[in-house]
Amino acid sequence: MGPISKKLIDGFKKTKNQKVINFSGIKEAKAYAKDLDKGVVSEDELSKYDPLHAVYIYAQNKVSVLVEQLSELPVLSQLTNALSKADDIYLPSSPPMSPHTTSYFTCWGFFDLCVGIKNESFGTVILDFLKNLKLDTGLIKIIECMQNSRMGIFIHKGHLDRYVILEELVTGKEMKVIVPSGYQGKRDEIWFARVMPEPFPELNYGYSVVFTTPYILINLNGDLGSSAKRDDWEAFFDRNLKATGEKDKIKAYESFMKYGKNKHFWNEYIFEGYVNYQADMIMLAGFPDKPLSMPHSKASQRERGEI
């Protein structure tokens, strides 16, 4: 447990009889996995969604409410200020207003943005808080999956019925996913996305969910729509994973995809690499360590005489 969590819990214990935070919404969730579809997934509100996707939508909504309430407390000011500044910079919504979608930015802001020596995020603080209060083990498990999640670089390996098969670079993990945005893509495309796993294997969903609108990585050196090359991205990781300090390549990759070289590493890549979009996906080009390869980097703008 980090110092932010400890201060929050200690402060709550002193004021637990005051209505500082409203937990009524959290207690609605069922404590056991077998009740998730009835408890976490409201038939009235979420029936239009895939069941697994709905589980994560529910949890994301609960986390959003808690972040809104907790962000008013001085003990979380570091996280609150960092998220607020990022919101002002990247103006998350959806293209053409911003290449940072709400789904991408909230996951980054709640689960990847961290401060302090213990790398505390809103997600870790909320988990410590809920565990200390012994609230809803089902919801805690889902939020743990979200906190442990990260963006990844994937190769499209084809389709199986309604599913897309993705293979992650470096880890080599192959997964069957649904894509709620509706984008199905094509074989050999390279995707930048956040994939959420089954939180409860005993429910046997048999697939994972691409929780963010997928970013499709393309090659601007040829036709606009040509896919980026796997070899080029593998070379990118060969150049950059050593920055994590991890000796194990998979651990280095996982750390790099979650935290980058700095807290805005992947945010900047989305902003500088943005090319175009359609309703169900967004196109990016270039590599974060090669400024001239990204169309909206300052180096590219200078090259074009725009600044």
Image: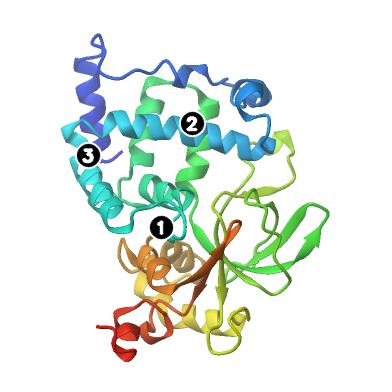
Along the horizontal axis of the image, is 100 left or right of 280?
left
Along the horizontal axis of the image, is 240 left or right of 4?
right
Using a 10 Å C-alpha cutoff, classify the residue at mark 1 as few (fewer than 14 neighbours), some (14 to 19) or many (20 or more): few
Q: Which residue is mark 2?
A: 140
Query: Considering depth in this image, is 262 or 101 the residue closer to the camera?
Result: 101
Query: Considering depth in this image, is 19 or 134 the residue closer to the camera?
Result: 19
Query: Considering depth in this image, is 202 or 85 the residue closer to the camera?
Result: 85
Instruction: Name which of mark 1 and mark 2 comes first in the sequence.
Output: 1
Q: Which residue is mark 1?
A: 97
Q: Amino acid at mark 1?
A: Met
Residue lying farthest to the top in this orientation: 17
Image quadrant where one finds the C terminus: bottom left
Q: Amino acid at mark 2?
A: Ile
Indicate whether 162 appears above or below 155. Answer: above
Question: Label 3 to label 2, Cα distance in Å?
Answer: 20 Å
Q: Amino acid at mark 3?
A: Pro
Does dot 1 land on a helix, a strand or a loop? loop
Callout 1–callout 3 Cβ contact below 8 Å: no
Q: Which residue is mark 3?
A: 3
Callout 3–callout 2 Cβ contact below 8 Å: no
Using a 10 Å C-alpha cutoff, classify the residue at mark 2 as few (fewer than 14 neighbours), some (14 to 19) or many (20 or more): some
Check the image and tell me how it is coloured.
Answer: rainbow
Residue 40 position, x and y percent, is 59, 25
Residue 75 position, x and y percent, is 18, 35
| Circle 1 or circle 2, nearest the eye | 1
Query: Considering depth in this image, is 276 or 129 the residue closer to the camera?
Result: 276
Does dot 2 land on a helix, a strand or a loop? helix
Picture quadrant where residue 18 is located:
top left
Residue 215 position, x and y percent, is 54, 64
